[in-house]
């Protein structure tokens, strides 16, 4: 069940990523639509985060490639923003909420560009959108998990991109914050933005997403939620049907074989 | 004392060199050390410091001269080499970082000592003083050294100030920096080169063995005083300068003393002072908070007592003897005295001879606390299903931290209750204007 679209926001072609000689992503090939909220789901170790990182050039891609709005990453970087998993950074770092959100402007400013009043206005607006204005001068170590996630979202908003890649934005977040983040995502969608979310709560998938990608090392399905969110496809993703693939992966690693001949 | 004034007023030309040299070396180490510290690479800094020793020895063996430029070049080569090997080893998790660090530190240092020993026994008269690289000797800094240090410091400090945004980003969130298109690889490499550079000149002051302390200690101390990266960098440099100045003095006043340990002792003293006195994070600031909390608890407990006595007698403003207060609740005599004094000072109680009574504001405040206590008891009973005889102890502690917002919320979800689980009346709330 793989539905393709014309004029995609993100497309991958035979994307393959190998960690420690074991394939984490095998031949991922999909086209995602623009202006939708898209979920990427699959069991633990399915390669969800790796997929996002591969698209952003943060991990080495062993074969295949991806395009964003039909172009190479380096040509459209300014139209893409990334929200990493919260626990990947040190929250005891000497920075205020404002400092972190301001990082969202550095993409446009580069290493040397001066922060202007309009940058500050954009940052303030982003803080307002996630309801964190009152916390602008707070040291980031004083924030709760939900507030941290909202700060990360504000940083991405300050980038004013067209495609947003969120890695597990609802992990370690209270129910209230989750709802308010979803509300913000819907507003973004109404402005024509494309939002791709790595997620793992099946209960909320139908409610949150317009489009769903099911992943378990290989691509199981990609399509409109009502077509993909079916018992059969979920079973295929979450049950052990793909264990042959992982057994082959184990063989490659144990016997030190390359994944591609050449 | 004469020695000190000679030193302080830079009366001897040699002193100028020693002071200038130490200040530059320690300031630079503290500056780059901030990033070593923030990127949690303190041990890597230690490994680099030990790894520059073989480079210094090799430079001497190859050239037969004690030229500071050759020393710097040699130190940087082996320092960078050690760092690159470390990265290669830890890449792909083939070797754990702690293993790689311990291994490279001891291997490079070992080779350095072997080379140093063989130089010392080679009969080359000009080798005297090379062993000073172990613990540092600021007193032997020459004008040629100063030139090299000066140029180095301009480049190091200049690069850091120029690229501070990039270094800040890779220290906080490397993936994000990469995603927004910053040249992360270049920034990382440059930061490594600058660190090795600062270490390679810094060993003149403190020696390879103690160099890591000079990188990390000022940064650690500075972090305690501020949450701003720029202020932190500035403070770290100032702390580094103070340590360097003191070390230079010792080196001048007692030439037999190794400089490095003194610089490190001073830097450590600054760090200890920071741990004690820094606002917010310091030990004393935390004691202060605890003391304030204890006092608040004490005051509120005394007010509650007045209120309960008032409930019994039916008159809240009535005078109460100090002995009666003690009879109600086992206060420590000193504690009670101190609490009563605090309350009197803030106008919540009045004292006439040895009797006390609540003022109007006191009644108000007492009602508030009793109300919080009883609301919380009710909440525990209703929502946590605790028995009425189990709720009191919990409420004793919680009543002191409930904010007006939480109070309003509690009151609302409990339906503006009139009585608590023990069927005593909950005082009405007051609007806070």
Image (cartoon, helix red, strand yellow):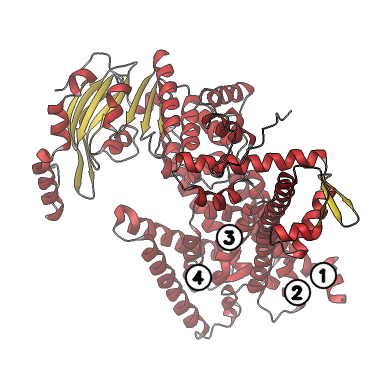
Quarter holding residue B25: bottom right
Q: Residue at x 44, y 32 (%)?
A: B180
- For the residues tagged 2 and 1, is the chain the same? yes
In the rendered structure, find residue B7 and report the number of the disc placed on it: 1
User: Which of the two marks, 3 or 4, is nearer to us in this view?
Assistant: 3
- Judge the density around disc 3: few (<14), some (14-19), many (≥20) Cα neighbours within 10 Å: many
| Real-space Cα separation, disc 3 to disc 4, in angstroms | 17 Å
Q: Residue at x 58, y 53 (%)?
A: B34
Check whether the beta carbons of the residues at disc 2 and disc 4 lie within 8 A of each other: no
Q: Is residue A55 above or below residue B420?
A: above
**What is the secondary structure assignment of the residue under circle 3?**
helix
Quarter holding residue B273: bottom right
| Real-space Cα separation, disc 3 to disc 1, in angstroms | 26 Å
Q: Chain of mark 4?
A: B
Q: Residue at x 59, y 25 (%)?
A: A124
Please state the horizontal and vertical placement of residue B9, each as a whole percent of the image. 86, 65
Q: Is residue B303 above or below residue A99?
A: below
**Mark positioned earlier in the residue sequence (4 or 1):** 1
| Real-space Cα separation, disc 2 to disc 1, in angstroms | 8 Å
**What is the secondary structure assignment of the residue under circle 4?**
helix
| Real-space Cα separation, disc 4 to disc 1, in angstroms | 31 Å
**Mark positioned earlier in the residue sequence (3 or 4):** 4
**Mark positioned earlier in the residue sequence (2 or 4):** 4
Q: Residue at x 46, y 39 (%)?
A: B383
A192 vs B153, nearest the viewer: A192
Tally of numbered discs: 4
Q: Which residue is mark 3?
A: B215
Q: Is residue B96 above or below residue A218?
A: below
Q: Is residue B21 visible?
A: no
In the rendered structure, find residue B252 and report the number of the disc placed on it: 2
């Amino acid at each position: 069940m793989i539905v393709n679209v014309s004029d995609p926001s993100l497309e991958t072609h035979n994307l393959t990523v190998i960690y420690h000689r074991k394939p984490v992503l095998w031949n991922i090939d999909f086209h995602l639509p623009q202006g939708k909220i898209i979920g990427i789901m699959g069991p633990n170790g399915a390669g969800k985060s790796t997929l996002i990182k591969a698209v952003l050039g943060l991990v080495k891609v062993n074969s295949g490639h991806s395009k964003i709005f039909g172009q190479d990453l380096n040509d459209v970087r300014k139209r893409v923003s990334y929200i990493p998993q919260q626990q990947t950074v040190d929250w005891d770092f000497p920075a205020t909420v404002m400092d972190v959100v301001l990082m969202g402007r550095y993409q446009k400013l580069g290493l040397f560009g001066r922060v202007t009043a309009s940058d500050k206005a954009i940052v303030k607006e982003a803080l307002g959108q996630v309801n964190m204005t009152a916390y602008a001068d707070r040291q980031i170590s004083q924030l709760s998990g939900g507030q941290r996630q909202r700060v990360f979202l504000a940083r991405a908003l300050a980038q004013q991109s067209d495609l947003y890649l969120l890695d597990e934005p609802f992990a370690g977040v209270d129910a209230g914050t989750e709802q308010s983040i979803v509300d913000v995502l819907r507003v973004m969608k109404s402005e024509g933005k494309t939002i791709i979310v790595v997620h793992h709560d099946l209960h909320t998938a139908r409610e949150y997403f317009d489009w769903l990608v099911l992943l378990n090392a290989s691509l199981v399905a990609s399509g409109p939620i009502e077509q993909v969110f079916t018992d059969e496809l979920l079973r295929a993703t979450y049950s052990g049907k793909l264990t042959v693939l992982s057994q082959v992966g184990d063989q490659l690693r144990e016997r030190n074989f390359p994944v591609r001949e050449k | 004392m004469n020695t000190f004034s000679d030193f302080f007023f830079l009366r001897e030309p040699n002193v100028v060199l020693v002071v200038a040299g130490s200040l530059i070396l320690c300031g630079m180490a503290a500056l780059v050390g901030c990033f070593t510290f923030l990127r949690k690479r303190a041990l890597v800094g230690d490994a680099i410091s030990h790894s520059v020793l073989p480079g210094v020895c090799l430079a001497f063996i190859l050239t037969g001269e004690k030229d500071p430029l050759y020393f710097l070049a040699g130190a940087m080569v082996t320092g960078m080499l050690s760092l690159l090997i470390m990265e290669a080893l830890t890449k792909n998790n083939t070797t754990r970082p702690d293993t790689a660090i311990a291994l490279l530190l001891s291997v490079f240092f070992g080779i350095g000592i072997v080379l140093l020993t063989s130089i010392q026994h080679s009969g080359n008269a000009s080798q005297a003083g090379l062993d000073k690289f172990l613990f540092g000797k600021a007193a032997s800094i020459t004008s040629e050294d100063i030139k090299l240090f000066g140029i180095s410091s301009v480049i190091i400090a200049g690069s850091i100030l120029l690229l501070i945004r990039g270094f800040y980003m890779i220290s906080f969130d490397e993936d994000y920096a990469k995603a927004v298109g910053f040249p992360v690889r270049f920034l990382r490499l440059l930061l490594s080169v600058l660190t090795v550079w600062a270490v390679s000149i810094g060993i003149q002051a403190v020696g390879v063995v103690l160099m890591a302390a000079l990188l990390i200690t000022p940064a650690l101390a500075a972090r305690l005083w501020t949450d701003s990266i720029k202020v932190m960098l500035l403070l770290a440099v100032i702390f580094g300068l103070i340590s360097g100045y003191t070390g230079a003095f010792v080196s001048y006043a007692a030439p037999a003393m190794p400089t490095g340990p003194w610089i490190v002792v001073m830097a450590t003293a600054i760090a200890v002072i920071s741990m004690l006195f820094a606002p917010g994070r310091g030990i004393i600031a935390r004691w202060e908070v605890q003391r304030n909390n204890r006092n608040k608890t004490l005051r509120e407990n005394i007010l509650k007592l007045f209120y309960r006595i008032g409930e019994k007698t039916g008159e809240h403003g009535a005078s109460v003897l100090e002995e009666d207060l003690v009879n109600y609740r086992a206060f420590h005599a000193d504690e009670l005295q101190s609490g009563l004094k605090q309350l009197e000072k803030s106008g919540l109680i009045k004292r006439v001879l040895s009797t006390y009574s609540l003022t109007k504001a006191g009644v108000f405040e007492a009602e508030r606390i009793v109300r919080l206590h009883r609301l919380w008891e009710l909440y525990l009973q209703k929502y946590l299903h605790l028995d009425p005889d189990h709720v009191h102890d919990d409420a004793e502690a919680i009543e002191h931290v409930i904010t007006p917002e939480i109070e309003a919320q509690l009151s609302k979800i409990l339906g503006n209750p009139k009585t608590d689980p023990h069927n005593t009346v909950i005082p009405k709330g007051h609007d806070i204007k």
